[in-house]
Amino acid sequence: MSKEKKAFHNILVVIDPAKETQYALKRALKMNELLDGGVNIHLFISFEMDELNKTQNKFEFVCDHNWFGELVKPLVDDGIEYSAEVFWTADWHQSILKCVRRHDVDLIVMSDYTTGTNHNDLSAAKWSLLRVSDCPVLIVHPEAKMERQTILAAVNMQTDNPRYVELNEKILKMTRLMAGTYGAEKHIVNAYEDSMQFPDRAKLLRDTDSKQENTHVQQGNPVNIISEVADNINADVVVIGTLSRRGIMAAMRGNKSEEIIRKLNRDVMVLN
């Protein structure tokens, strides 16, 4: 158990002072509870300037000592070791990346705060972070369950592209780690769009070390299939991957990973 705990030892929690409820912090507190302590939390407190500019032309926020005291009260009450930094930055995701490296962060936890449509809808800055993050990012859905009883890994095991092969390995490793850490049930979903791409089911079971009844292989649009399987098994968190991009490519949107994140109404862990 000690090895699993180390994987989630240093957690960076993204705090948006403009939001009344800090769902990412709630999830980090729950993780500490499920792991019986041992979690260090670093609070990254910053506004997303693009989001502020979208909602209003003029804004004023007062984040005084009382506000900060209320924010960290649950951490103090639970005896959780924490630190905090306040940023005013136009380069939000790069500031987070630098913070991750300074504090040797194992996991970023952030919320999308989207409740109107019950679907994730990440901002451009958050999507940029997912593309280049050095560590896993947990996207917390405000209405998702906080338990960790069922973990779903979305893989593409029929590919021979080295980058996707490596990504599959990362997804499976993280899923095993989370299932072992939380005592959760592990499920695998492998969607394929072309009948000629049907994966070798026996090999899939061996490579993923999964139970047959927990392995979901279906033909069709991966976005829809992953979402449907997650709903059917009532997954607490879905682990997906996205290929890291830099420069102009990092700014491009609309790939399968983003569509999956938008469609799921539960927590999503993203690896690249």
Image (spheres, rainbow, N blue to C red):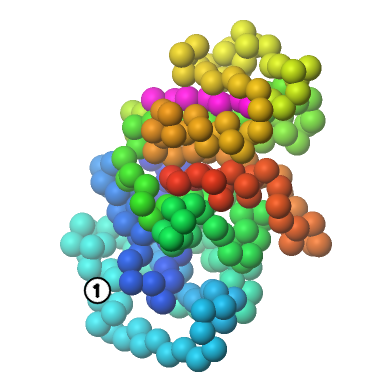
Residue 253 in view (yes/no)? yes
The x, y position of residue 80, in whole percent, is 27, 58
Residue at 67% across, 54% down:
131
Residue at 30% across, 77% down:
68
Is residue 137 depicted above or below 192 in this figure? below
- Residue ranking furthest to the front: 117
Give the structural element (helix, strand or loop) at label 1: helix
The x, y position of residue 98, in whole percent, is 59, 66
The x, y position of residue 76, in whole percent, is 22, 65
- Residue ranking furthest to the top: 202
Q: Is residue 45 magenta?
A: no
Q: Magenta span covers which residues?
A: 185-191
Residue at 25% across, 76% down:
69
Residue 142 relative to residue 220: left or right = left
- Residue ranking furthest to the left: 77
Q: Quadrant of residue 36?
A: top left
Is residue 18 depicted above or below 6 in this figure? below
Disc 1 marks which residue? 70
The x, y position of residue 17, in whole percent, is 40, 76
Residue 182 relative to residue 272: left or right = left
In this view, the residue in front, 230 or 39, is 230
Crowd tier of the residue under label 1, counting other residues whose Cα lies within 10 Å: few below 14, some 14–19, many 20 or above: few
Tell me which secondary structure the magenta stretch mostly adopts. Answer: strand
Which quarter of the rendered picture does the C terminus lie within?
top right
- Disc 1 marks a residue whose amino acid type is Glu
Q: Is residue 190 magenta?
A: yes
Is residue 190 depicted above or below 27 in this figure? above
Is residue 41 depicted above or below 227 in this figure? below
Residue 66 relative to residue 184: left or right = left
In this view, the residue in front, 136 or 194, is 194
| Numbered-mark total | 1
